[in-house]
Amino acid sequence: MNPRIAVLIPCRNEGSTVGTVVTDFARALPLATVYVYDNDSIDETAAEARAAGAIVQHEPHLGKGNVVRRMFADIDADVYVLVDGDATYEASAAPTMVTQLVTQELDMVSGIRVGTGAAFRKGHRFGNRILSALVRAMFGTGIDDMLSGYKVLSRRFVKSLPLLSAGFEVETEIVVHALSMRLRVAEMPTAYVERPAGSTSKLRTWRDGGRILRIIVMLLKDERPLWFFGTVAGLLALLSLALAVPIIATFAETGLVPRLPTAVLSASIMLLAFLALTCGLILDTVSRGRREQKLIAYLACGRDHKA
C-alpha cells in the first residue's frame, strides 16, 4: 500500500516563489498532496499557491513555528515532507528521501544543504556548524545540518512532537526531539540554491541566531535538567571554594576568621549550589516522565504504511 504523502510548505510573503515550489514538488511526488499554509502574507502567496494546485490554509499567528505546529496538528498523512516556500531546496531529491524514510523505517531524513556563494553564505555556514556541533555535544550525534528547512518525517515523529517554539527555532526543536528520543534519523546531501530575484529572506542572522541559541539552552534545561543544573551547581561550588580558600588558610594559621562578609558570601554561594543540584534532581524525574509520555504518544501511532 502506498504511503499517504503530504508536502507541507509554510509561507509568508513568498508570492514570487511559492508557485514554483508547489509545481516542482507536485511533479517530483505525483501521489502527494501539497499544502501551503499562508502566514498572514500581504502579497499574492495564497493566490499563487492555489493557482499552482496546492491546498491553501491560513495561520494568523506570525512565526514559522506557529505555522508548522498548526500543519502538524491539522494534516493526517504517513509521510510528511516539510520544505520552505522560497525555491531554494531541491524538489527532485524528495522521492529519494521519502523512499529512504519508508524502506529503512526511519523517523526523519534531513536534507544537508550543499550550496556555495550567496546561496549559503560563509557566515551562515559557520553559525550552522557551531550550533549543530553544540546540539550534538549536548543531545547526541546524527545531525550535521541542524538548521536545514528540508525534512521528511514519519507520522509517528510528527504526532509525538509537542512543538512550542514560535519562529525559526522550530528546526532546532525538531532535531532535539529526534536526538533526545533516540529516534532513527538520517541525512542526505541536497542542492541548495540562491533565492530567485525579487524574493526576500525573512531570516535575520544575529537575531535568529540568538533565538536559536536561546532555544538550545532552554531545551537543554528541559530535556537534561540534571546536566544543566549540575553544571550550574558545579560552577557555583567552585566559586564558593575559591572565595573560601584564603579564609580557611588564614584561620589555619591564626585561628581568626578575617573578612566576615566574604565568608558569608562564600557560604551563600555554596548554598545556592546545593539548591541548584536539588532542582536538577527533581526536574530530572519530571523530564523522565515527559519523555515517557512522548514515547507513549510515539508508540500509539503505530508503524507507518509502506510502499
Image (cartoon, rainbow, N blue to C red):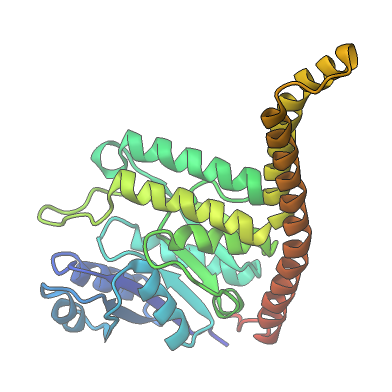
Q: Position of residue 67 (x, y in %)?
A: 36, 75
Q: In which quadrant will I find the C terminus?
A: bottom right
Q: Residue 172, relative to residue 152: is it above or below?
A: above
Q: Nearer the viewer, residue 186 or 129?
A: 129
Count of numbered marks? 0
Q: Residue 242, relative to residue 193: is it above or below?
A: above
Q: Position of residue 215 (x, y in %)?
A: 49, 56
Q: Residue 237, relative to residue 21: is it above or below?
A: above
Residue 75 visible within the image: no
Instruction: Tell me where residue 244 sits by quadrant.
Output: top right
Task: Report the residue at 71% width, 51% height from top.
Answer: 276
Q: Nearer the viewer, residue 146 or 165?
A: 165
Q: Position of residue 190 (x, y in %)?
A: 41, 52
* Image position of 184 (left or right of 164): right
Residue lying furthest top in this view? 253
Q: Position of residue 127 (x, y in %)?
A: 42, 39
Residue lying furthest front in this view? 256
Instruction: Tell me where residue 242 sits by quadrant.
Output: top right
Q: In which quadrant will I find the N terminus?
A: bottom right
Q: Residue 182, relative to residue 193: is it above or below?
A: below
Task: Report the residue at 89% width, 18% height from top.
Answer: 255
Task: Report the residue at 56% width, 65% height from top.
Answer: 108
* Image position of 275 (left or right of 17): right
Q: Nearer the viewer, residue 285 or 118?
A: 285
Residue 143 visible within the image: yes
